[in-house]
Structures are given as structure tokens and as C-alpha cells.
Amino acid sequence: MLQSRTKQLHKAPDLLLIVAIFSLLLIGVIMVYSASAIWATYKFDDSFFFAKRQLLFAGAGIVAMFGFMNIPYLTWRNSSKTLLIVCFILLIAVLIPGVGMVRGGARSWIGVGAFSIQPSEFMKLGLIIFLARYLADHQKKITSFTKGFMPSLSLVMVAFGFIMLQPDLGTGVVLVGTCMLMIFVSGARIAHFVGLGVLGLAGFAGLIISAPYRMQRITAFLNPWEDPLGAGFQIIQSLYAIGPGGLMGLGLGQSLQKFYYLPEPQTDFIFAILAEELGFIGGTFVLLLFFLLLWRGIRVALGAPDTFGSLLALGIVGMITIQVMINISVVTGLMPVTGITLPFLSYGGSSLTLTLCSVGILLNISRYAKL
């Protein structure tokens, strides 16, 4: 009966969502070129090296997005268990020496040469889909700690544990934050979250203490000028980029920090280069586009015809929003460095493609939602 109902409600996807997505993608490709041209020329003798690859990733992601947009979202409900199993297999495989590739001190990639995938990105989407189904099917039990809250939490913690074995704390935080948001909205008791929060803080402190580089990031966040050439280097160079940008910016392509001061400026710290070149106005415009995506995504979640669709839309929007908030906070010195990319803007294959696949599902839900 639900399937017949969704067929009756079938319509065009949300136009404002599409506008926000394509605007962010366009800005992302332009800024990847601007931020990486100097470094790409030095390393690869091709100023367009990163821009061309980003354009390729964006093109593949757009094709996937439109494909996912035309797949009824209830299809993912039926295949959620299979998807989750595949994601866990990939997470286990990446930990095997010779299969997983080490980059930046983390064994997070599977692939050959420059073309690779990041299993943790697949896990974020796979877990959101499975959790949306589980919470929809067990909504009446979610207020029970043993029957509803604990089973869903245990699954999230197992996925988080595998990601931390890589280790990749940033992706793990986004995954846990998104899933906790879904569990909370599905009706879990606040008292359970309070107890979980205490345990979570203790566990988070343990993770920081267990790895010296994480402690260095914390101390650098509190006072980056204490170690300006070491742990505090990235934050200081990011602030040096944002500050001179002022209201209007130095002009597109005129960044000084991309001249080997800010490491890998086309990835995690691309917003700093954007703020330097386009100023407060450019940075605010990008944030407004993200806010537009958030607003329309919430409207889709509220107007979805069933609980599964509502939770799935919320999870996708929550994942993107949490990642944006963390990235911008890191770049502006409000949080320690976590290694999280900025959705749609930062250079990257797996992250960009999976994000576009996710919003493709969101667009499909919008075709059935009452907006």
C-alpha cells in the first residue's frame, strides 16, 4: 500500500536542493583549481592536475546522483542489510596489509595507485540507510534501553571501532554524530543520552590520550602559537589566510597562503583559501548555500510519506551538516584539526562521489515528499 502511495505522489525533485548542490559543486571546482594550481605545477608540472580530477569526480558523481534520484528510495530499505554487510567487509579489508593503503598515517584506502576508494565513506551512507530502516521498524521500542536504544547504539559503536582501527577520528565523529541525531529524533529518551554523553566524553578523552598526535592537536588548538612550526602550523596559516581576506577578499586566484604556506590547501583547508580570495562575502555566500541545502533537506524529511524516508533524509542532511560544521570550525580555529573535508568543495574522489550519491537519494525522497 505504501508503494502505491509513493507512486501517486511521484513528482519532480526539489529545485532549490538542485540549485544549492550545483552551485556548491561549481564553486568547489573553481576553488580546487585556484587553491591547487601552484602546488600542482610544482609537483606534476600541470596547474590543472587537481582541477581536472575534481571535474572528473564531480562528473561521475553527478551521473550517479541523477541515477540515484530516479531509484525509488524504498529500494534501499529492502537492500539495507546487504549494503551494511558489504560496508563492513570493506572496512575489514582496508585493515589488511597489502590491501589497505596508508595515507597521512591512516590505513583508510583501497585501490591501485591514485585511483582508490575510502570504505569509511561508504560506511557512513550504508549505516544511515540501515539505521533508518531499523529505527522505523522498532520505533515503539526505542524508548527501551535494552530493546531499542542499546542495539542501535551497539551497531554504531562497532562501525566506529573499525574506523578507529585505521585510525580516522574525524570520519568516526561524523558517523557517530549523524547516527545519534537519527536515534534522538526517532524518540529515544534524553536520560539515555545523558548517560551516553558521560561515557562518550570519557572514551573520547581516552582516544586522545592514547595517541600523542591527537593530544598535540588539542594543545595546538588551545594555543597554536606555542608550536608555530609544528602542531600549530596549519591553524596559524589558516588564520593568516582568512584574516587578510577582509570583506571583499584579495580576488580570485590571488591567495598568498597557497604558495606552500598552507599544506594541501585544496583539501581540508579549502575554505581558508576561499575566504582569503573571496572575503567575508564569498564565505558567507557559501555558508548560505549550505544553509539552503539544510533547510530544504529538513523540509524533505518532514514531508516524507513514511518514517523510513523521513529518517533517511534526516540522516543524509545531518551527515553533510555535521561535516560542514566541523570543517568550518577547524579552519576558523574553533576546533582542533580533525582531517575532515568540506562537502562539495574539497578535493577528493570517494567523499565527493558518495556525497552526491547521498543527495541523489535525498532528491528522490523529495519527489514523494509534501513540501
Image: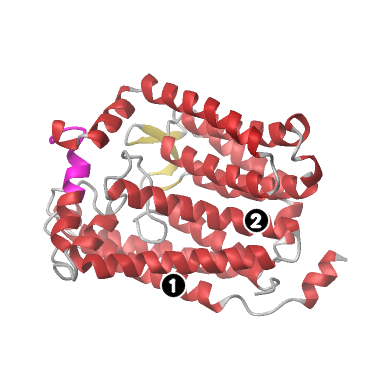
Q: Quadrant of residue 190?
A: top right
The structure residue drawn at horizontal position 76% and vertical position 61%, both measured from the top left corner, is 306
Q: Which residues are magenta?
A: 227-238
The structure residue drawn at horizontal position 39% and vertical position 68%, both measured from the top left corner, is 288
The structure residue drawn at horizontal position 21% and vertical position 33%, both measured from the top left corner, is 231
Please state if 90 lies on the left or on the right of 21 as rendered. Answer: right
Instruction: Give the SS element for disc 2.
Output: helix
Please state if 113 lies on the left or on the right of 141 as rendered. Answer: left
Q: Which residue is disc 1 drawn over?
A: 22
Instruction: Give the SS element for disc 1.
Output: helix
The residues bearing labels 2 and 1 have C-alpha atoms spaced at a distance of: 22 Å
Residue 15 makes an appearance in the image: yes
Q: Which residue is disc 2 drawn over?
A: 312
Which is closer to the viewer, label 2 or label 1?
2
Where the N terminus falls, by quadrant? Answer: bottom right
Mark 2, residues whose alpha carbon is within 10 Å: few (<14), some, or many (≥20)?
Answer: many
**Amino acid type, mark 2:** Leu
List x then y, in percent, for residue 122: 54, 47
Q: Quadrant of residue 145?
A: top right
**Amino acid type, mark 1:** Phe
The circle drawn on residue 236 is none
The structure residue drawn at horizontal position 44% and vertical position 50%, both measured from the top left corner, is 323
List x then y, in percent, for residue 143: 75, 39
Tell whether position 228 is magenta: yes
Q: Out of 58 and 362, give the one closest to the viewer.
A: 362
